Every structure is written in structure tokens, then in C-alpha cells.
Amino acid sequence: MAVAIDIGIPDKERKKIADGLSRLLADTYTLYLKTHNYHWNVEGPMFQTLHTMFETQYNELALAVDLIAERIRALGHYAPGSYAQYAKLSSIKEETGVPSAQDMIKNLVKGNEAVSKTAREMFPVVEKSSDEPTADLLTQRMQIHEKTAWMLRSLLEKK
């Protein structure tokens, strides 16, 4: 026999939050896959720097998808877990080719900014529901993605 969830957030609001987190999970997983792909396939004079940087980033993203999925489960919903689901939910386009190192950096800037925007869009329902654990998760994700976008953008400066 299942025990009803009684954490002070009504079912309807938990569903809205879980739906938003599912989009965040899809964005994060798609960015993880893109970053891992770039780690494997980067070439050129910045190879060592980018290969190492992308590895750090995809490892962080791998941990993040688990935190996001577990929050969805704590809210009483199932986390999406297939490429087909992620393709429908993600605002980030999947990478099918091997772009230049410069284009990889640009694509990852856009991807990190997209994840940050997806997280930011959730705040109205999260704040209305007084869902501090999700708000904390979203804040942490935005800080990481905005910092990562800045670091990547810095590689494109020509000063």
C-alpha cells in the first residue's frame, strides 16, 4: 500500500515542479552528452586545455542529472530517462557532427545558458509552493552554468 506524499506542497503544484525539473533534466542530460562528445572529439592547438575542461564539465553534469532526477522522485513523480523523452523536453539541440574547437566552445556557452534559463523559468511555481529544496537546487544549477558559460566565453576573447 502506497503512502501519500504530505510535504506541504499540493499534488498539482508538485506535478508542475516535477514537469519543470523534467525539462531541466533533459537539458542537463543533453548538455552532458554534447560535452562528452566534444571531450572525445576536440582537435587543434587548444586540445589539451579543452579536453581537460570538457571532462571536468561532463563529470559535473553527470552528478547533476542524478540530483535533478532524485528531486523529481522526492516530489512523487517519475524522472524521464530515455533519449526520446529528452529530445521532446530539451531546449538544447543534440550534436550530430564534429564542429571546430571554437564552435564547440560557442555551442557549450549556448547550452549552459539554456540550462540556466530553464532553471530560472521554474522559480515562480517553486516560490509559490515554498519549495525551498528545489529552489536551492535551481540556484546551485544556475550558479554553475553561468560560471561555466563565462569561463568558456573567456576562451573566445582575442585580447
Image: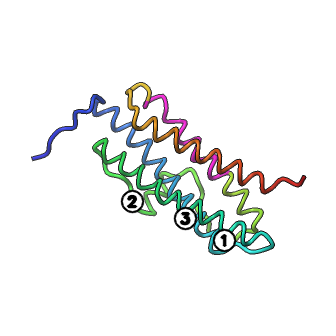
SS at mark 1 in the image: loop
Rendered location of residue 43, percent (x, y): 74, 74
Q: In which quarter of the image is residue 106?
A: bottom right
Along the line of sight, which residue is nearer the eye, 45 or 102? Answer: 45
Instruction: Tell me: residue 60, above or below residue 145.
Output: below
Q: Is 95 a magenta residue? A: no
| Crowd class of label 1 (few under 14; some 14 to 19; many from 20; radius 10 Å) | few
Label 1 to label 2: alpha-carbon separation: 23 Å
Q: Of the numbered discs in the image, which one, if any, rests on residue 33?
A: 3
Residue position for label 1: 97
At 63% from the left edge and 64% from the top edge, which residue is drawn?
54
Please, what is the three-letter code of the amino acid marked with disc 2?
Gly
Please, what is the three-letter code of the amino acid marked with disc 3?
Leu
Give, as a single range, the part of the protein colored magenta: 110-126
SS at mark 2 in the image: loop
Q: Which of marks 3 and 2 is nearer the N terminus?
A: 3
Residue position for label 2: 81
